[in-house]
Amino acid sequence: MIVDAHFHVWDLSVRDQDWIDEHSPLRRNFTIEDLVPEARAAGVDHAVLVQTITVPEETPEFLALAAEHELIAGVVGWTDLTRPDIADELARLRALPGGQYLKGIRHQVQGEPDPQWLLRADVRRGLAAVADAGLVYDLVVLPHQLPACVKAAASLPELPFVLDHLGKPPIVSGALEPWASDVRALAALPNTVCKLSGLITEADLASWTVDDLRPYADVVLDAFGPQRLMFGSDWPVCTPAASYEQVLATAQELTDKADRTQMFEITATRVYDL
């Protein structure tokens, strides 16, 4: 069985995705109906739907979508971590139709100007509520924000932190440091997990090769080990650079065959309680 631990959908007629450039091929609708045939053709059995923008309406929509589609085994949604009633809001989301599919929370930390955003008292209180609710927290950050991730994860050992897209390493430049050292520091904490996802879109979209990605994949393979790594397609963000099938094949090429059941099924199933 293969689990895709990271994909998105959006409908521009419902709301804009203001992070998408007006000339990007991503500026169109991508629906679950678009993904299902591609995922099934690639042998993917289940997938985790991840938030795209910071609006409260999206998460209930995603939960309802999960209730309707067999492919969606879990949802990583968004809610404002700083709201005073965060615990009540998480309980409300889980009581909605499809609420049993809520597995985690994510915020676009990569867009926060404060590199210490995760360490703010109000944010930490929200993260503690996520832990109390039995949920996971996905980290979508840039490399300079990784030190704050380490401190946040160390301060909340009861909360599983999942690093999306390897922390967006500088693949185009070919640099490994300080990204690699910061990732290793995060991986040293037992409550952290990493997604082998988003690599292709951090590389040169037009001319990337597997060899461009391998040094970065090797760092997380060594740091986290297969027991704390999971595959994510990052569909449809990946599509300007590669097809769904290519993304999966690339991830498999970057990993040892003996580790694939763990990384492509078991880790995501365990961490997200699918």
Image (cartoon, rainbow, N blue to C red):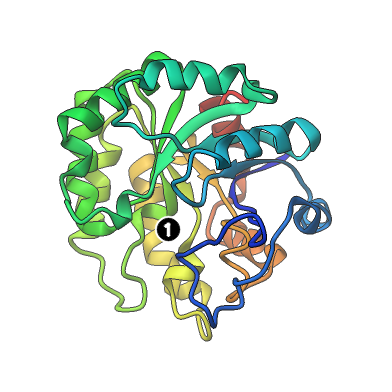
Q: Which residue is mark 1?
A: 217
Instruction: Return the residue nearer the eye: 207 or 117.
Output: 117
Q: Is residue 263 visible?
A: no
Residue 160 lies, in percent from the top left, at 38, 27
Residue 248 lies, in percent from the top left, at 65, 59
The image shows residue 210, relative to residue 194, as above or below, that is below
Q: Is residue 73 visible?
A: yes
Q: Quadrant of the N terminus?
A: top right
Instruction: Return the residue nearer the eye: 185 or 115.
Output: 115
How many numbered callouts? 1
Write down the quadrant of residue 74 in the picture.
Answer: top right
Write down the quadrant of residue 263 in the picture.
Answer: top right
Instruction: Return the residue nearer the eye: 141 or 112.
Output: 112
The image shows residue 20, relative to residue 207, as above or below, that is above
Q: Is residue 166 left or right of residue 12?
A: left
Residue count near mark 1 (Cα–Cα under 10 Å), binned few <14, some 14–19, many ≥20: many
Residue at position x 38%, y 53% from top?
Answer: 166
Q: Is residue 211 left or right of residue 64?
A: left
Amino acid at the residue labelled 1 = Ala
Residue at position x 46%, y 38% from top?
Answer: 78
Residue at position x 26%, y 53% from top?
Answer: 112
The image shows residue 66, relative to residue 205, as above or below, that is above
